[in-house]
Image (tube, rainbow, N blue to C red):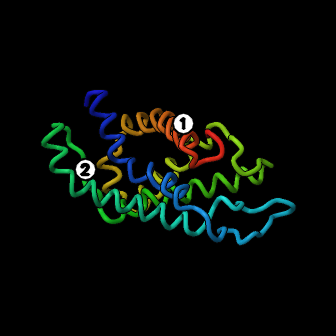
Amino acid sequence: MSPLELLVLAIWVMLPAYVPNNAAVVAGGGRPIDGGRTMGDRRLLGDGKTWRGTVVGTLAGAALAYLLNLLQPTVVSFLGIGVPTFPLAAMIALPLGAMLGDIAASFIKRRTGRKRGAAFPGLDQLDFAVVALVLTAVVAPSWFLSVFTAGLLVVILVVTPIFHVVTNVLAYLFGFKHEPW
């Protein structure tokens, strides 16, 4: 598979995991998941992790995976690159895993004393992708193993931080986020 084909495939299979956090930011607000609870003197997650954002983000990613399934024959025909369809388990696991990864990162940030919105290089850029991949591997193992080759995983782990930085800067510039990371 050529580098361009790997890049297209990486974007295709990860789009349902890339979109949820952006959708959650746009739809955010509402009740915090942690209900204001603390561990020691620090919040468990903080006000930025809400039930509404988590549900909307997960549904947005699943809806995108469904749309990609509908577009798959056209994309294969147009690009000449074999992109897979998403089984139901992956349609849910990729976006839910992305949201759970972001929640886990928030928990880690609070435990390390970082405030809401504080940067945590590395964790901020890969948390959602790694948990999305792990959850998908658990709930759709045969699909995962047939799609995610070692080369594809390397491309995903290299490209994801770049996409994350670019989309966060854009969200900041358009006023959706209070910080550009």
Which residue carries the number 1 mark?
165
Q: From mark 2 to mark 1, how far is it between C-alphas?
A: 26 Å
Q: Quick one: which residue is furthest to the right in this view?
A: 41
Badge 1 density bin: few <14, some 14–19, many ≥20, Cα 10 Å: some
Q: Residue at x 45, y 48 (%)?
A: 18
Q: Quadrant of the C terminus?
A: top right
Sequence-earlier tag: 2 or 1: 2
169 vs 132, nearest the viewer: 169
Disc 1 element: helix
Q: Are marks 2 and 1 in contact (CB under 8 Å)?
A: no
What residue occupies the far left of the structure in this picture? Answer: 77
Instruction: Report which quarter residue 78 is drawn in.
Output: top left
Relative side of 55 to 64, left or right: right
Q: Amino acid at mark 1?
A: Val
The residue depicted at 52 percent of the width and 39 percent of the height is 170
Left-right relation of 46 to 79: right
Label number found at residue 84 = 2
Q: Position of residue 32 (x, y in %)?
A: 66, 68
